[in-house]
Amino acid sequence: MITLVPIASVDLFEVEELLDEAFGTDRHQRTAYRLREGTDPVPELSLAAVEDGVLVGSIQCWPVQLTDAGGNIAPLILVGPVAVRPERQRDGIGRMLVAAALDRSDVLDSEPMMLIGDADYYDRFFGFSARHTGGWTLPGPVDRDRLLVRLRSGQQVPPHAALGPRGAATGPDSSRSAEEQSASAPADQALVPGGD
Ligand SMILES: CC(C)(COP(=O)(O)OP(=O)(O)OC[C@H]1O[C@@H](n2cnc3c(N)ncnc32)[C@H](O)[C@@H]1OP(=O)(O)O)[C@@H](O)C(=O)NCCC(=O)NCCS
């Protein structure tokens, strides 16, 4: 049986090993990692899936923010990495982890959840969409189709703003334009199946 527990209750080294297995050891180069710099995972929304005492999956969520041209800040939560041990993939564990984090965020009435990932998966099962993210800038290249946000009823996000770690001095001037970023997104970002 699979149990979801707070990620802080499992060995961090094992989590890092799982992430290397799922994403490769070069994962730290990804733009999503720039968004997490200097922050800690949100404890209530960061979970480990454990089966017979073995770590089989994990999800971490991070505090990020959008800063618009006027310096207004809108807090969001970055979902990911979500990872399932390769030999246990496609057995519902990823969905279980994402659904649990989203359910908790709904109960806590937390900020909008966003991620960089495969819309085929995150739209289909969880209602994430790229519809509101086209004018965001990021501290690195991103495939625009994979920059997704999920808004609960009544939630809004600024259409043009710079995304960065919560508390960081980010602003539109500190990042390249959405068009520049899209044009220079490396092909490998588009080819990663699941996301960051
Ligand atoms: C992506 C990942 C988290 C999904 O978790 P999982 O436990 O393997 O998948 P689930 O069992 O929850 O979901 C299975 C369903 O999702 C679909 N699916 C799985 N990965 C998908 C992807 N990358 N794109 C589109 N659909 C996907 C499967 O086809 C399956 O659909 P079906 O039920 O119609 O057959 C997992 O495969 C993984 O860790 N991959 C490597 C790391 C990664 O890319 N993580 C991305 C998240 S940030």
Image (spheres, rainbow, N blue to C red):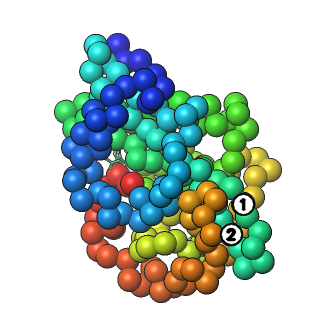
| 86 or 75: nearer the viewer | 75
Q: Residue at x 69, y 48 (%)?
A: 111
Q: Which quarter shows the C terminus?
A: bottom left
Amino acid carrying mark 2 in the image: Thr
Which residue lies under the disc numbered 2?
Answer: 67
Q: Secondary structure at mark 1?
A: strand
Q: Point out residue 42 in the picture as x, y percentages from the top left corner.
A: 56, 40
Which residue lies under the disc numbered 1?
Answer: 74
Residue 88 to residue 38: above or below = above
Count of labels shown?
2
Q: Is residue 49 left or right of residue 148?
A: left
State which quadrant residue 53 falls in: top left
* Cα separation between marks 2 and 1: 6 Å
Residue 171 to residue 44: above or below = below
Please say if the residues under marks 2 and 1 sit with CB atoms less than 8 Å apart.
yes
Q: Is residue 31 left or right of residue 79?
A: left
Neighbour tally class for label 1: few under 14, some 14-19, many 20 plus, Cα within 10 Å: some
| 167 or 123: nearer the viewer | 167
Q: Residue at x 64, y 59 (%)?
A: 167
Q: Which quarter shows the N terminus?
A: top left
Q: Point out residue 104 in the picture as x, y percentages from the top left corner.
A: 62, 31
Q: Earlier in the sequence, mark 2 or mark 1?
A: 2
Amino acid carrying mark 1 in the image: Ala
Neighbour tally class for label 2: few under 14, some 14-19, many 20 plus, Cα within 10 Å: many
State which quadrant residue 73 falls in: bottom right
